[in-house]
Amino acid sequence: MSGRRRSATLAILFGYASLLISLARNILFVPIYLHSIPLAEYGAWLATGGALALILINDFGLSGVVIQKISVNFGAGDLKALGSLAGSALAIGSLMALLLSALSLACVPYLPGLQSLDPFQKHTVVNCFLIAVAANTLGLAATTTMSVIRSLQMAVAAGSIVLAADVANVTVTLLGLLYGNGLYAIAAGMLARSVIMVLAGGIGLAIICSRSVPMTLVFRWRAVRELLGDATRFFFSSIAMKMQSQANVVFVSSILGPSSAAIYSLTIRAHETVMMLISQFNSALVPSVTHLFGSGNLVRFRAVLLRLLLSVAAVAALALSITVILNAGFLHLWLANQHFLGQDLSILMAIAFFISSLGYVAYDALVSQGKFNFVSNVFVFTSLLQLLLLGVFLRFGLWVAPIVSSICALVWGSWFWGKVNVGIRLTSAEARGLFLDLSCLAGVSAATAAGFLVFYPTVNSWWSFIAEGLLSVVVLVFGYLLSSSTIRTIAREEIWMTLRALRPT
């Protein structure tokens, strides 16, 4: 168990290091973006070049299948199957990258959101989209390699490669912006990140196979059929997840215009950053949780899952509450309040993301068990529901977008937890206890946020902003610990076990 905990903890630490770099790119650099890039051009990039490149170029669930298959076999000690699964996965990922690149290039004449741009801006967005396609093509091959490395519990190797790639991304982007390259700087940063990941990932996997995990990468049709079978089931799920994450800004751009899309994106930028933190926490734990499931210790798997639910809920509640409290002041100091659409939108988006964070714990549990078909069907249904609701109601205002996100997250999250409960069979007492603990988190968060928004003085400097942030953290943490004995126990035990697992052996 200590090996799995150590791997998961190191993966989280490396993930948070990368997240800090993402914060610089997604928040600290935005004033430079807006100074160097016209608002309409930047909004069109967010809605087309950035969003569609990610939708069109992704592994369509292959990495999730690879992590599940290899982690389960590694946990069960079946080293014979690892080489064929890893080798076949790399071959599939490379071929998929080439095919999806061709598909993306065919979509260039039909990119949405460009009608309001002048010819020069349109040319810039299209060129940057092409660079983004190239970057994500290389990134797709690198993602498959990183999935194999993570599945082998090599958190340090995977984390180091991603961290180096993220540093390169930020460095190239910043230099490009400072030298007046505008939107091209963002696309070039994406390309630099992918190049480093694909090169370092290949070298790292070769070293691991020769020294740490004795396996030979081979291509076998049986493994290909196994991976493609599950990846095909997961195909629509991946598309649906991408659509759910990007649909709001795409619809806002199409219905209300690219400038509205840019302002909407800036208003919820802090919320999205929080979800990056939470998703990093989840994704770092998936290989270890799947490894645990593969070992056959289902009792421990059940206990870890329930503890993970409360841990993720506490992290999400804390982070999103702080976001609601600080968002207006942050945008006031950051962008002189020119791009803030109001507290209502901020609060509604925080609620949507909190519901999603609970649902993703069940999603991770289902993926670790290989229930790809069920996950895919649910996500496809809720994605279509989201598109329908946005298309019908978004014209009434931007506040519709987070409400639609909340509804869809509640639907798929409840569906996922219902399926998980079939396997773990929560007792009535456990269900009541979980509901009470989650209610305590939500209640403390709501009361604290309301108190700060109503009674705390408006921040007028970065020092007062930091002071409000620190005070809100202290109030929230003490509120959570005082309101729930379960959360106090989890916090104490998790800190102790993690410190013990990180001790040098």
Image (spheres, helix red, strand yellow):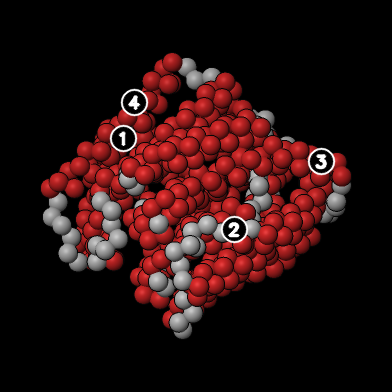
Query: Real-space Cα distance between discs 1 and 3?
Result: 45 Å
In front: mark 1 or mark 2? Answer: 2
Single out the residue that lies furthest toward the bottom: 179
Judged left or right of residue 54, residue 485 is left
Asked if residue 446 can be seen in this view, the reply is yes
182 or 441, nearer to the observer: 182
Q: Amino acid at mark 2?
A: Tyr
Which circle marks residue 110 in the picture? 2
Name which of mark 1 and mark 3 comes first in the sequence.
3
The residues tagged by marks 4 and 1 sit, at their Cα atoms, a distance apart of 10 Å
- Give the amino acid at mark 1: Ala
Asked if the residue at tag 3 contacts the one at tag 4, i.e. Cβ–Cβ closer than 8 Å, the answer is: no
Mark sitting on residue 442:
1
Q: Secondary structure at mark 2?
A: helix
Q: Residue 458, labelled with which disc?
A: none
Helix, strand or loop at mark 3 = helix
Question: Does residue 324 lie above or below 301 as drawn?
Answer: below
Residue displayed at 54% across by 19% down:
425
